C-alpha cells in the first residue's frame, strides 16, 4: 500500500514547484489509497487539496466533481461539523464559477448561504448570495437576481475588514444591474453609490454600470460612447461583451445598421449564446427581414423562455402580418412577467398590447392596458423602489 503521508508531502512540494497537474495525480493516488477507518475529515481534507490542484491546473470541471464528492462526505456529519460543510460548499461554489456553470452557481450558492448562516459564518453566506445573484443575472433571471443581490447588500453591510471589501461591492454591483434591467433607476443609482464607496475590485465593471446609468438618465453623449468603446476593447472579457452589447443596442436605436453589425461581429466570443441570439433577432427586426426575424425570435423564446423573447416574437409576428398571434404572445408576456415580479416587463408588454388592441379595434382593452402601463411606469420611478 502506498505511503499516504509521503504522497501528501510530495503533492505539497509539487504544488509549490508550480506543477499542479502532477500534484493532482499524487493526491488522487492518496485519496484512492486511504483506509475507510480514517476520519471523514481526513478524507475531505485530501479531496479539498485535490480541488485546489485541479483548479490550479485549469481542470475546472474535474475540480467541481471532486468538490461535490467532498461535500457529499460532509452531509452526514454536517450537524456536528458545520464549518467543514461550509468549507466544502464554498469550494464547490467557487469551482462552479470557474467552470462557468451558472445553474450550479445558483444551486450551490443557495446551499452555501443556508449552511453558512447555520454555522454563523456571515462572510461565506454573503459569498454564496452574491455568486447566486451574479449567476442569475447572467441567466436573465433578473427579478430573482435583484432579490438575491438585495439580500447580499443587507448581509454584506454587516461585514467588516477584507470580507466586506471582497463582497459588499460585488453585491451592490449585482443589485445595480438587476435594478437597472427591471427599470428601477433610482434603486440602481443608490446601489452604484454603495459600490463606489466600497473599493470594488472590478473598476471596469463599475465604470460600465456608471456609464449605462448616465445614458439612462441623460441620453447618449460623446463621452459615454468613448467610455463604452474603450471598455469594449480593453476591459476584461465579460465587461468587454457587455460594453459591446450596449454599443450594439445604441446603434440599433439610432438605426445605424452598419455599426450595429460591426459590434455584433465582436460579440460572439464574449457573451452567452442567449444574449447573442437576442442581438441577432433584434438586428433582423431592424433590417425588416421578416422571415429571419421570426425564425430567430422563435428560437430565442424556446431557448430563453423569458419575457423579452416574447416581446421580440410579437414584433416579428407583426412584421409578418400576424397581429392576432402577436396579441396572444403579448398575453403570455404579461402573465410571465407578472408571475416573475418583473414590473418593467409587464409595463412593456401592456404598452405594446395596448397599441395592438387599438389596431385590432378593441378600444376599451387598449385604454385599460395604456392606463396600467402608465401607472407601472410611475411606480418604477418611485423612491419606494429603493429597498434596504
Image: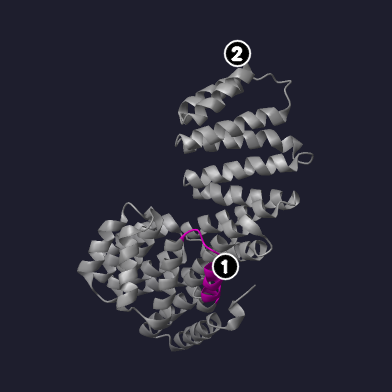
Q: Gap between marks 2 and 1, in whole Å?
A: 58 Å
Which structural element holds mark 1? Answer: helix
> Dot 1: few (<14), some (14–19), or many (≥20) neighbours within 10 Å?
few
Residue corresponding to mark 1: 339
Q: Residue at x 38, y 73 (%)?
A: 324
- Residue position marked by numbered label 2 in the rendering: 2
Q: Tell me how the rendering is colored.
A: one colour
- Res 210 visible: yes
Q: Quadrant of residue 84?
A: top right
Q: Residue furthest right?
A: 80
Q: Secondary structure at mark 2?
A: loop
Of residue 284 and residue 80, the one placed in the foreground of this image is 80
Q: Quadrant of the N terminus?
A: top right
Name which residue lies at 59% across and 23% down: 9
4 in relation to 205, above or below: above
**Residue 371, position as x, y percentages in the image:** 50, 87
Q: Which residues are magenta?
A: 187-202
> Looking at the picture, does residue 290 appear above or below residue 161?
below
Residue 186, x across and y down, in percent: 53, 79
Residue 388 located left or right of residue 254: right
Q: Residue at x 43, y 82 (%)?
A: 354
- Of label 2 and label 1, which has the lower sequence position? 2
Q: Nearer the viewer, mark 2 or mark 1?
A: 2
Amino acid at each position: 500500500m502506498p505511503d499516504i503521508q509521503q504522497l501528501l508531502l510530495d503533492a505539497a512540494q509539487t504544488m509549490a514547484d508550480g506543477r499542479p497537474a502532477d500534484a493532482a495525480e499524487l493526491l488522487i493516488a492518496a485519496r484512492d489509497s486511504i483506509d475507510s477507518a480514517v476520519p471523514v475529515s481526513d478524507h475531505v481534507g485530501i479531496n479539498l487539496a485535490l480541488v485546489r490542484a485541479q483548479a490550479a491546473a485549469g481542470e475546472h470541471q474535474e475540480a467541481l466533481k471532486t468538490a461535490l464528492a467532498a461535500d457529499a462526505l460532509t452531509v452526514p456529519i454536517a450537524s456536528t461539523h458545520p464549518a467543514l460543510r461550509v468549507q466544502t460548499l464554498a469550494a464547490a461554489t467557487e469551482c462552479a464559477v470557474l467552470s462557468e456553470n451558472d445553474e450550479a452557481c445558483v444551486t450551490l450558492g443557495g446551499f452555501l448561504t443556508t449552511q453558512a448562516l447555520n454555522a454563523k459564518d456571515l462572510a461565506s453566506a454573503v459569498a454564496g448570495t452574491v455568486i447566486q445573484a451574479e449567476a442569475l443575472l447572467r441567466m436573465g433571471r433578473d427579478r430573482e437576481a435583484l432579490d438575491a443581490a438585495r439580500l447580499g447588500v443587507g448581509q454584506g453591510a454587516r461585514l467588516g475588514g477584507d470580507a466586506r471589501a471582497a463582497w459588499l461591492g460585488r453585491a451592490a454591483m449585482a443589485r445595480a444591474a438587476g435594478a437597472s434591467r427591471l427599470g428601477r433607476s433610482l434603486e440602481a443609482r443608490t446601489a452604484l453609490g454603495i459600490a463606489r464607496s466600497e473599493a470594488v475590485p472590478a473598476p471596469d465593471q463599475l465604470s460600465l454600470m456608471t456609464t449605462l446609468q448616465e445614458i439612462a438618465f441623460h441620453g447618449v453623449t460623446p463621452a459615454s460612447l468613448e467610455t463604452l468603446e474603450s471598455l469594449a476593447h480593453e476591459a476584461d472579457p465579460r465587461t468587454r461583451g457587455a460594453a459591446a452589447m450596449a454599443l450594439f443596442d445604441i446603434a440599433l436605436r439610432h438605426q445605424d445598421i452598419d455599426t450595429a453589425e460591426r459590434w455584433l461581429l465582436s460579440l460572439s466570443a464574449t457573451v452567452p449564446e442567449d444574449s447573442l441570439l437576442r442581438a441577432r433577432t433584434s438586428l433582423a427586426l431592424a433590417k425588416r427581414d421578416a422571415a429571419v426575424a421570426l425564425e430567430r425570435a422563435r428560437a430565442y423564446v424556446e431557448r430563453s423562455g423569458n419575457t423579452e423573447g416574447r416581446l421580440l416574437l410579437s414584433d416579428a409576428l407583426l412584421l409578418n402580418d400576424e397581429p392576432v398571434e402577436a396579441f396572444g404572445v403579448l398575453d403570455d408576456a404579461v402573465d410571465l412577467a407578472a408571475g416573475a415580479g418583473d414590473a418593467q416587463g409587464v409595463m412593456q408588454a401592456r404598452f405594446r398590447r395596448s397599441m395592438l388592441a387599438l389596431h385590432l379595434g378593441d378600444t376599451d382593452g387598449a385604454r385599460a392596458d395604456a392606463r396600467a402601463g402608465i401607472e407601472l411606469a410611475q411606480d418604477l420611478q418611485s423612491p419606494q423602489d429603493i429597498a434596504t
